[in-house]
Each structure stands twice: as C-alpha cells, then as structure tokens.
Image (cartoon, rainbow, N blue to C red):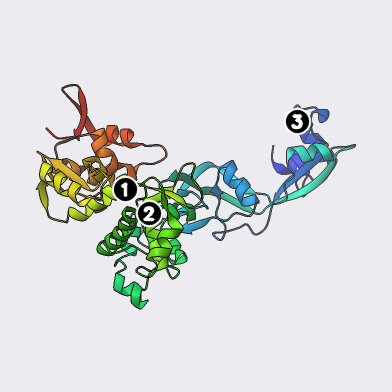
Amino acid sequence: MDVDELFGEGMTYGRSVDNVKSVIEMAKLEDSDLHSFSQVITFSPELYGDEVKLIYVSKDMANSLDEGDCVYLRGSEDEPVVLCTKDKTYDFKEAETSNNLFILPNLTLSKKCSELSKGDRTLTWRNVSGQFCKYFELTEMRPRIQKLRTVLQPPLTESEVKERNAAGKSFADLSECIQASEIELTEGLNALEAVQFECDWFVLEQEYQMKVLSYLLKLFSENSWPLDCVNKSESIETLSELVNHEILSRVFDIYCAPMLGGTSDQYSLDKDKVSRFYGDFLLVDGSSFALDEFLDMWQKALPEGIKADISHLDGLAMVIDSVVKRFTEASLPNNIQERLYVLFSAREKWSVPELTPFIQPLTTPKLNVKALLTKYARPVNVQGIKYFCAKHGK
C-alpha cells in the first residue's frame, strides 16, 4: 500500500485524526493503548548539512554540559584531534551507523506525552531538521603530556630570573598546544616540576634548581629542624634575599608536602624525591658507573638523613651487569611497539616492576601495564620470576 492509499490522495501525512486512527487499526493496535497526544513527523525542506555534527556522549558529560560546562577540541595539523572536558581527555573519531539519525528539536518525549494525553486524540507536527548516518564517538584516553617537556624548553636560568627577561608559556598558551584537560595539564606541570614565574610557566635549569634546593636543605640543617617538620614561611622569609620568591616557594612545594597532623605552616621533606633529584643530577647523559661506585658517590652527595636507593631512579636509569647508566622514559618513542623495541634492544628481559615506569605513561583507562605487556611482549619464567621479552625474539 502506498502513501496516497494510506492517507488519501494529495493529503499531508497524518493531516487528520481520522487518518491516524485508520493507521492504528491497520497496525492492529487499540486506540486506548496509545497516548492521545500524537506527533506527526515530517521533513523540513532544508535539512542541516555539514555545519552540524553529532557527538555521542556519556550521561555524565551530557549532565555537565547542561550545567554550563564546556568541552574543547584540541590538536594541531599534525596531530589527531582530541576532545577535552575540564578533567578528562577523549579520543575523537568518526563512526557510521546503519540506521539514520534524525534531529527533531521540538520532539515531546514520553513522560510529557503522558501529561498531555487528556481527552480526545490531538495532533501536532514535528519537523526533522537533520538526517545523519555518521557521528563522532569518544573514548577516554591518557592526555598527551609528553609534548610539554619540549614546549617548555629552553629551561629557565638564574640570570634570566634576576634580569627578568625570561619568555615562557602562559597556561592559556599551553592549553592551546597540549592535548589535555585543564586539570590534567596542571598535573603534568607538577609532574614535570615546572615553575610559574611572572605568570608564565618554565622548567628550571637543573643547576639552578640544585642551587635553590641546596639553600633550603642547608637552612633546615642550620635550624636543626627534623626533616619531617620544616617551616615554610620562615624558610621563604629567610632566603628571599637570595632567591626570587616565586621560584623559592615553588621549589619548596616540589620537595615538601604538608605535614600530616601539623599546622598550616609545617611541612615534611620528601626524602625520596630529593634522593631522586641528586641521583639524576649526578648521572649525566652518556656516562656510566659501576653500581656500587655510583651508590657510594650518590650517598655522599646527599644531606644527612636521606638514603640513596637505585629504585629512586625508576624511569631515569637502567642497570645492566652491575653497571648503571642514564636511560630516561622521556627519551623513548611514544608508540608502544616502538618503545618496547628500544627497551628490549637495550636489555633482553625485564621484570614488570622494572618496565612499569617506562610503560605507565602509555597506559589507557582500559589497558594497564600488564595488559600492554601481554599484548605486545612475551612472558618468560626464570627461576620462578616472571619476565617479559620481545614478542618475536629468541
């Protein structure tokens, strides 16, 4: 049966209540089974074109958008685009559907239909303003923070701070070029131990950071403060003539955390982080040391009360046959397969704890370190200990 036979020749779809009742009977339904408020769907003469795109979002994201939150698309010409909310980053890819998707801006939903269904059947017309067979789907991903280290180069020097002629990047600048949400970008800056100076962000030159940290550690020692209870305001006030206030305060916060159960001005020194910085400072590019020799040199450089441990250099160094050399996670490729190739070329087999600091930055909400290793590497058992090696190696 064609449209004209169903509705009457020359009639607009569902023009009368009688037509609708006729359709209900043909569908072998009872009029009482349906809402008396009926909506007749017609197509607008001009449907939306490429100026409108559909994105499938989660209920939580939809609710946040209803509350006024914003989302941002980020990516340069040589990067795949991502979508960022205030706290998460999503892979943003086009998908197809076998069923057409219609946009009906004024459609009345079921609950409201029930409220409007009082008395005899009534008709109202709704226009389809868009028809789509493609949409964008989102997959939560880790932010692409690795680029941050490059963007913040060259490092900020002591002379630039004193002369106030440094040119860094504002947070807005970084938001434009780093594919991460604002919260994730802030976390990335903290992980990189970046500093904010005169509204711009920088990484500190290593020698300058060592100098500022040494001032602080010397002050703690001179005041006979226990390392788990040091005073921030007194430290800043005492050293403010030697170091810029912003830099000094930031370096203090990098290596000290609020003391558990203490006052607002009492902090505890993060001994492991201090140890890591000193070890990193000593292990320059291209150098290698006998492990025992390096541990002895490292320990002598550290202030009293802080103990060196090779585990503090996870992601910064590698030990092979009792020889330690610089091997940083930041220098590895960002592709998981390429990264594992470099790792297994440097050393034939690794335990999961040894690999974790090198693989963790490439994990996703659905693939943790073990899942990535299971997918792209091969497990071997050596004297009851599980290791991973190249998937297609010997």
C-alpha distance separating marks 2 and 3:
75 Å
Instruction: Name the residue furthest right.
Output: 119
How many neighbours does mark 3 have within 10 angstroms: few (below 14), some (14-19), or many (20 or more)? few
Residue for badge 1? 273
Q: Where is residue 91 drawn, in percent x and y?
A: 43, 48
Foreground residue, 128 or 282? 282
Residue for badge 3? 26
Q: Where is residue 202 drawn, in percent x and y?
A: 36, 65
Q: Where is residue 288 drawn, in percent x and y?
A: 11, 50
Q: Quadrant of residue 364?
A: top left
Amino acid type, label 2: Ile
Residue in the image at 14% along x and 40% along y:
347
Q: Quadrant of residue 45?
A: bottom right
Relative to 33, 167 lies left or right: left
Foreground residue, 308 or 33? 308
Mark 1, secondary structure of its residue: helix
Residue for badge 2? 254
C-alpha distance separating marks 1 and 2:
9 Å
